[in-house]
Amino acid sequence: MKLHGLSAFPITPMDGRGHADVPALVRLVGDLASARVQSIGLLGSTGSYAYLPRQTRAEVTALAVEAAGAVPVVVGIGAPGLGMVLDHARDAVEAGASALLLAPVSYQPLREEEVFTLYRIVAAEAGLPLVLYNNPGTTGVTFSPALIARIGALPGVVAVKMPPSADAATEIPALRAALPADVTLGYSGDAKFAGALAAGAEAWFSVLGGLFPKPCLDMLAAAGDAERLAALDVRLAPVWEVFGRLTSYRVIHAAAGLMGYGAPVPPLPVLPLQGEDLAAVEAALTEAGLLE
Amino acid sequence: MKLHGLSAFPITPMDGRGHADVPALVRLVGDLASARVQSIGLLGSTGSYAYLPRQTRAEVTALAVEAAGAVPVVVGIGAPGLGMVLDHARDAVEAGASALLLAPVSYQPLREEEVFTLYRIVAAEAGLPLVLYNNPGTTGVTFSPALIARIGALPGVVAVKMPPSADAATEIPALRAALPADVTLGYSGDAKFAGALAAGAEAWFSVLGGLFPKPCLDMLAAAGDAERLAALDVRLAPVWEVFGRLTSYRVIHAAAGLMGYGAPVPPLPVLPLQGEDLAAVEAALTEAGLLE
């Protein structure tokens, strides 16, 4: 499979008592599929995978795969222990997922050889295409370009999800040259994605796209038109501002509530935005034309 | 309960196939109890709690509590999600643990109010005395002195486990003054513990003590004798050197193998020390008089 285009990363709507809000989840995933996103990134960081016990992750995956219909679902399987990672992979296979997303969730800081070993074993044993999920802000692991290339060359690895780059114009051609041609090079970090797209990013692993796919699909369609791409990006600047200030994870949970997908709250101990912060999210969405 | 003195943090011996090595675990915990450590810190960072699924953690706790006899067992319950933390707490209560050890394991970087909320809820609901486990190196959470004081004042919190301090002589009196009198102020970071002890640390949460309790108990007994304390600490300097260079977690797993507690390996993706590194551990233990 190729993971080009928009990989929409929805939240996992939770009801505040530790259970998934099933109707909200099914509606959210169904709406993303109807919007014709290229894939759905279920149980990514935005989807709270790290906070949910195995059984909940398995249930959410089965529901989402059904709601997504023909749209491939890529499922986050990360955990500190390899045994837990392989359990999550088995559950995802069982639930009908199309690919697996693996961040090197760590507790003891990992050495480069340990990170490689994790991917080597999972790529060989998991039974589904694997995406390298590079997210230093949450995992504490920094991937060197050499390690990315080494993991990208493993049979079974189909894509790399990079964090936002301070210098996409240099980074992307270098990584592209270092990776096998059939491995998709994609980026997260919505606020900087226009720059990554202009520099050759092939997929957008998007938080915003997990709730508002249309403006993200529009940006991807404008890849060859620098002026239009810039205009679409500027329009979303108020959203990028609150993402940067309040974190995209907290903002998109608040936004999902404002958009009527239940009353989603992040899993404790992460607290929902309230008061002025919540008002700032509402104002930013309104200014960006995402909320009427 | 008061957690003064040596809190010995054993590894959880694993067999390399994802299962606890039960005979080695029972023998290790039994040997610590026979050495009359003041408490056993089960499933701490050294005990690999973050890598083990709920069921394994529950089984290990039940076995260790039985093997520890009259020595209180403090059990690590940390996990990213509050729901999982409370599940682990219930399991520990059920298994007969004496207290709970909670590090703010995070995925999304936590705000100070979120860290406080975690401790507030767990202290109120967990049903056992709670120890604040301050471990920035593995959790990424830095506790301000004000936050430590605020959590220390919660009913149910009985001790604070601090990371090694660069300036114990200033830090310890300040924290002691800020904490309620009945909350134990203890330190981890074996290589710097002599300094913390001289500055008033009341408990030693020790990696070395989880395998070699005798030299640690000797150091605690020398608290009032600066010259003897320094001599005992210097004797262990070769161990502190390999702890610093190879990490105490990896070193103590190798040392447990050398001491005959099975063939313990850290849970994958953490790799066991080999070759030169393993030889360096053996040499350090020999030089420190811990291995014949």
Image (spheres, coloured by chain):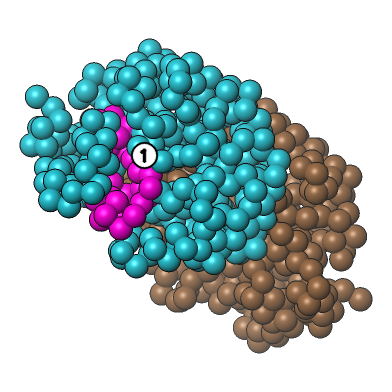
Chain colours: A cyan, B brown
Query: Could you tell me which chain the residue with mark 1 belongs to?
Result: A
Can residue A148 be spotted in the picture?
Answer: no
Closer-to-camera residue (A42/B189) = A42
**At x 25% / y 24%, what residue is drawn?**
A257
Residue A70 forms part of the magenta stretch = no
Q: Which of the pair B38/A77 is nearer the observer?
A: A77
Picture layout, residue A258 above or below residue A136: above
Q: Position of residue A159 (x, y in %)?
A: 50, 47
| Numbered disc 1: secondary structure | strand
Compared to residue A2, the image places residue B145 above or below, namely: below
Q: Is residue A113 above or below residue A44?
A: below
The residue at 63%/52% (across/down) is A154
Left or right of B64, for residue A1: left
Q: Amino acid at mark 1?
A: Gly
Quadrant position of the N terminus of chain B in the picture: top right
Q: Residue B132: where, in percent of width, then height?
A: 50, 49
Quadrant the C terminus of chain B occupies: bottom right
Quickly name the residue at label 1: A5
Which residue is at the front of the view, A123 or B245? A123
| Residue density around tag 1, few if under 14, some if 14–19, many if 20 or more, within 10 Å | many
Along the line of sight, the residue nearer the viewer: A173 or B19: A173
Residue drawn 85% across and 42% down?
B22
Q: Which residues are magenta?
A: A187-212
Residue B166 is at least partly visible in this image: yes
Q: Position of residue A189 (x, y in %)?
A: 32, 49
Residue A205 as seen in the image, left or right of residue B236: left
